[in-house]
Amino acid sequence: MTKTLIKTALALVSGLAICSTTQAEIKKIPADYLEDDQAETAKIFYTAAVEPHLISELVYALDDLNINYPRLKKIYLYLNSDGGDMDSGQIAYWAVKSSKIPVTTVNLSMVGSSATLIFCAAKERLSLPGGKFLLHASSLTGSEGLLRPDDIDNLKKESVMYNQVFADAYQQCSDYSEAEISKFLHSEGNRLLIDSREASSKKLVSGLADGIVQAPIVYHIVENSDAQNP
């Protein structure tokens, strides 16, 4: 019998003068550890933006698998995300890279912006046919009014630091040269939108998948669009 465990986490998202409450949802099948303590494969579907409350659920899922399923040999992380928060992307990068159980990342359809950090963290990186990647410069969003010279300097410094995070990741997970990376991280006009074949030619993708693997343990991490403000 299939069981479903639903775990929710609330996070506050603020922007300018508007405050709202969003909800992340993680569904795990099955919920009972005893049913699948001999499992060797698990998979996680992450189909959401890269945001703190959602990434915390991804980290939870990885920790749950590493702690409670000692016989697991591989975790497949299926991604469909346009990106989002850079700090959250870095956290997910290290969570995937530090997993005791090897993680294989798979592009379901789109992996863009900070979501590429998560994708790059795995040694084995796959894409389904039609998978797309967006590689571009980091951007900053703020509610500052008038900017002083030191504000501009600080924003520039922050932007350079985040672009370096991208550069470091791409240098270790692809064959893009330092000059190529510097070019597409310089401006939005130089961004790269590439398909899985081009990504494969640059070793960003290490192989092409022909389907989604079957696994006895499955997590689904999504943005709960039905969440209501309190």
Image (cartoon, grey):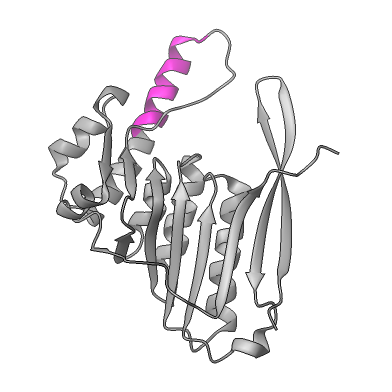
141 versus 74 height, above or below? above
The residue lying toward the viewer, choosing from 101 and 154, is 101
Q: Position of residue 149 (x, y in %)?
A: 43, 11
Q: Is residue 157 magenta?
A: yes
Residue 41 picture location, percent across and down: 46, 80
Q: Quadrant of the C terminus?
A: top right
Out of 168 and 229, give the one closest to the viewer: 229
Q: Is residue 181 above or below residue 31?
A: above
Total numbered badges shown on the rendered structure: 0
Q: Looking at the picture, tell me which residue is in the foreground, 159 or 137.
A: 137
Q: Which residues are magenta?
A: 147-160
190 relative position to 56: left or right: left
Name the residue at 45% across, 73% down: 75
Q: What's the magenta bit mostly, secondary-structure-wise?
A: helix
**Left or right, 224 with reference to 43:** right
Q: Is residue 18 above or below residue 97?
A: above
In magenta segment, residue 124 = no
Residue at the spot 71% in from the left edge and 76% down from the top edge: 3
Q: Quadrant of the N terminus?
A: bottom right
Determine which quarter of the picture holds residue 208. bottom left
Residue ID at (13%, 44%): 177
Q: Position of residue 59 (x, y in %)?
A: 55, 62
State which quadrant residue 221 falls in.
Answer: bottom right
Residue 98 image-quadrant placement: bottom left
Q: Which percent across, then down, holds residue 103?
A: 40, 70
Please state if 109 lies on the left or on the right of 143 as rendered: left
